[in-house]
Image (spheres, grey):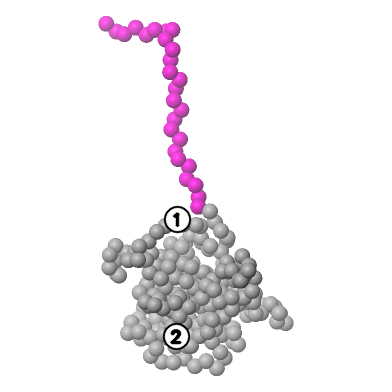
Amino acid sequence: MLPVRNPFARRRPAQPPAQPHATIAPPTFSHYSTPAVPNSLWFASDFLLGAGMVVIQPSTQRIVLIHDGSTGLWILPKGRKDIGESLEQAALREAYEETGYRSQFLPLLSGSRAPAPGSLRNAEATTEPIYVSTIRFGREYGGHGGEYLTFWYVGYIDEDAVREENTGMIDEKQYVSHLLTPQQALERLGDATIEAQILQMAWHLFGLTYLSSTEDGQADQEPSPPKATASASSQGHRNRRQGA
């Protein structure tokens, strides 16, 4: 016998369709940075610390860029810090080993959050890093890979600086450094790479700090400050080796 439906029975209200969980976009700090990353914790074997440098010759308004003869790539000096070495020492050492030039730190008006004594923010020119970049590395260092954090500084060489030969490691013997205009350097790095955006910002800050009071107030072919893009974040350091 078929069941009889009671027309007076209370019916349950229809359930609304399940709504997909909204994806909350991570906050963005400024146009010059990629969005925030989740709070993270990495054990000693799961991360690397490195330092890189944009080297400028103020007298000629040129930038030192490295050409790797073994791969054909153009790169900025960068590499892992050694045990007991500070990030500043690593930046100067890597710049010397890979370019052949002895650089010095260049103070810039970067708006660094590193505080001056008695202040929440330093409004003066400093030699603090202008960027920190991250990239995931694989099993080349053992284990399951990890995060490679690089602190980027800006340095300078004098007008009469002389490039020394054979300053690099075994796998850097094909490195040859060149003094290029900012535009030439950007073209060789590729506009979508992290290193190109770092170079752009370094040159912008150099102009802001040292060239704004000159007669024309501008550097030769000065690029505008870059806006960090997701494409640069994903491409990362594909234009250079990780193990420097």
Question: In x, y percent, where is residue 11?
Answer: 43, 15
Task: Inspect the image, locate mark 1, and give the three-letter code of the amino acid beneath it.
Answer: Asn
Query: Could you say which quadrant of the image residue 48 lies in?
Result: bottom left
The disc label shown at residue 96, or none: 2
Q: Residue 26 or 57: which is nearer the viewer? A: 26
Question: In x, y percent, where is residue 128?
Answer: 54, 74
Magenta run includes residue 2: yes
**Residue 129's x, y, as percent?**
52, 72
Q: Quadrant of residue 173?
A: bottom left
Along the polypeptide, which appears first: circle 2 or circle 1?
1
Main secondary-structure element of the magenta-colored stretch: loop
> How far is the residue under mark 2 from the one under mark 1?
35 Å
In this figure, which residue is indicated by the disc labeled 1? 39
Taking the image as drawn, is residue 34 in sight? yes
- Kindly state the secondary structure of the residue where label 1 is placed: loop
Residue farthest along the right direction in this orientation: 215
Choose mark 2 or mark 1, whichever is in front: 1
Q: Residue at x 45, y 55 (%)?
A: 38
Marks 2 and 1 in Cβ contact (< 8 Å): no
Give above or below for 21 relative to 196: above
Kind of residue sitting beneath label 2? Tyr
User: Residue visible at 49% across and 93% down?
Assistant: 162
Disc 2 packing (10 Å; few <14; some 14–19; many ≥20): some
Q: How many marks?
A: 2
The residue at the point 32 percent across, 64 percent down is 145
Q: Residue 18 in magenta? A: yes
Q: Which residues are magenta?
A: 1-26
